[in-house]
Amino acid sequence: MAILDSSVIIELLRGNEKIIREVEKLNERLNTTLINFYEVVRGVKGKKREKVINFFKEMDLYPLDLEASMRAIRIYDELKSKGAMINELDILIASISMVRNEILITLDQDFKQISYLKLRILEK
């Protein structure tokens, strides 16, 4: 199984053929997090919002639980000590991926800063 990051979800919703092909090649059950749901849906207004919400209904939406929160704290401390801080929502998303032992599919190079994260970075 794999977790889709917001950057990939946005490109799928835009109909980016290259990203669609790359995701289809994964041949994985695709899921995401409630954090990604929030990031994507908050940016959509009007009638398009319902279409976007329906897109998410095809996936499991993983919450931020205590185990993932504790992992996020460790990631935060590690990044801060290295002077390599990234977006805090990305830290939460990565921590959920890690505790679920799933690969994170993204377009965002910043995730490379996180040690031990199973990661697949797609090219736009």
Image: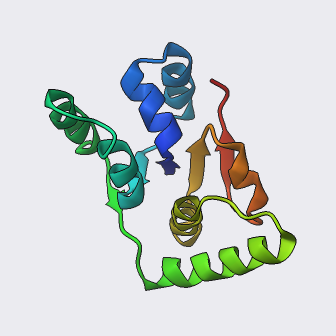
Q: Position of residue 83 (x, y in %)?
A: 83, 68
Q: Is 123 above or below relative to 74? A: above
Q: Is 90 above or below relative to 59? A: below
Q: Position of residue 97 (x, y in %)?
A: 54, 62
Q: 110 left or right of 52?
A: right
Q: 124 left or right of 56?
A: right
Judging depth in this view, the residue of 28 and 114 nearest the camera is: 114
Q: Residue at x 57, y 69 (%)?
A: 95
Locate the C terminus by quadrant.
top right
Q: Residue at x 34, y 40 (%)?
A: 43
Q: Residue at x 68, y 59 (%)?
A: 86
Badge count: 0
Question: How are the colours assigned in the image?
Answer: rainbow
Q: Is 36 above or below relative to 84? A: above
Q: Position of residue 96 (x, y in %)?
A: 51, 67
Q: Residue at x 58, y 51 (%)?
A: 104
Q: Residue furthest right?
A: 82
Judging depth in this view, the residue of 101 and 117 nearest the camera is: 117
* The quadrant where residue 62 appears: bottom left
Q: Position of residue 68 (x, y in %)?
A: 51, 77
